[in-house]
Image: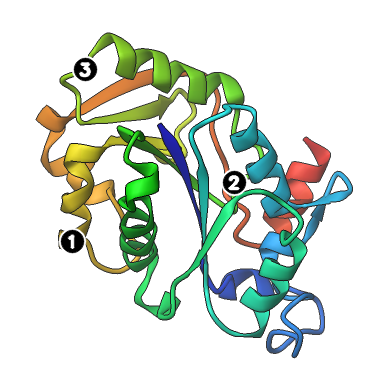
Amino acid sequence: MAVLVLAAGAGSRFSAGLPGTDQPAHDGVAASKLLAPLDGRPVLEHVLDRAAELRSAATVVVLGSGPAADSIEASIAWRQERRVINAHPERGLASSLRVGLVEMARPELASAGAALIMLGDQPRVRLGVMRALLAAAAATPMSLIVAPRYAEGGGSNPLLVRRAAWPLAAEMEGDRGFGPLLRARPDLVLFVDVSGTNPDVDTPADLAHLSRA
């Protein structure tokens, strides 16, 4: 298993919500939600640190392009994760999925039979949830996709996708990712019931809420 972290989004809702900010800062730092501090560390680092606890075959981080992405890449240059650039992040999360899965298909990652897909703006993702997905996948090898079902709602991430299902990413468009597939093809999906939720950081208010939680 390898980990794929999607971190190429523009974060326009976050930058629009910054006080006195009509547009992203020129260096991309002030308006990047992934670099926003949470408990003394950038949001993205929380996600990468959690991924590192799995000790997977590799972690691939998909970054966008432009000044904000350059700042994000510089902030994690000291880390060991593989980094790949989505030259067209405006095409949505689906494009980042495809870029990341192409990277994971390289021969040196051939041992990875599945990708655990994480979102870079979910800093409170829980190790226990990820381990529950891995355990469920090991117990049901015929399940192509293993997804959490949170008791309090909040999406279906992180998501474990076996290598045999990676070509399905070619059918995806925009920011929907695997979501439509989970609804349209429940026969491909094993849902794992877990407690709580897994919130995104989409706005400064979201970040403030997580800081207080």
In the image, 77 versus 213, the foreground residue is 77
Q: What residue did someone put label 1 on?
A: 170
With 139 as the anchor, is 24 left or right in this view? right
Tell me the CA gap for discs 2 and 1. 24 Å
Amino acid identity at mark 2: Gln
**Location of residue 95 with respect to 146 vertically, above or below:** below
Q: Viewed as shown, does residue 198 lie left or right of 147?
A: right
Percent coordinates x, y for residue 38 in the rendering: 81, 49
Viewer can see residue 173: yes
How many labels sit on residues? 3
- Label 3 or label 2, whichever lies nearer to me, is 3
Residue annotated with mark 2:
122
Q: Image point 69% across, 68% down: which residue? A: 72
Query: Residue 200: x percent and y percent?
Result: 57, 49
Whole-angstrom CA distance, mark 1 to mark 3, is 23 Å
User: In the rendered image, which quarter is residue 145 located in?
Assistant: top left
Quadrant placement of the C terminus: top right
Q: Which residue is mark 3?
A: 141
Residue closest to the eye, 209 or 167: 167
Q: Would residue 58 be found to the left or right of residue 77 on screen?
A: left
Let me know if residue 16 appears in the view. Answer: no
Secondary structure beneath label 1: helix
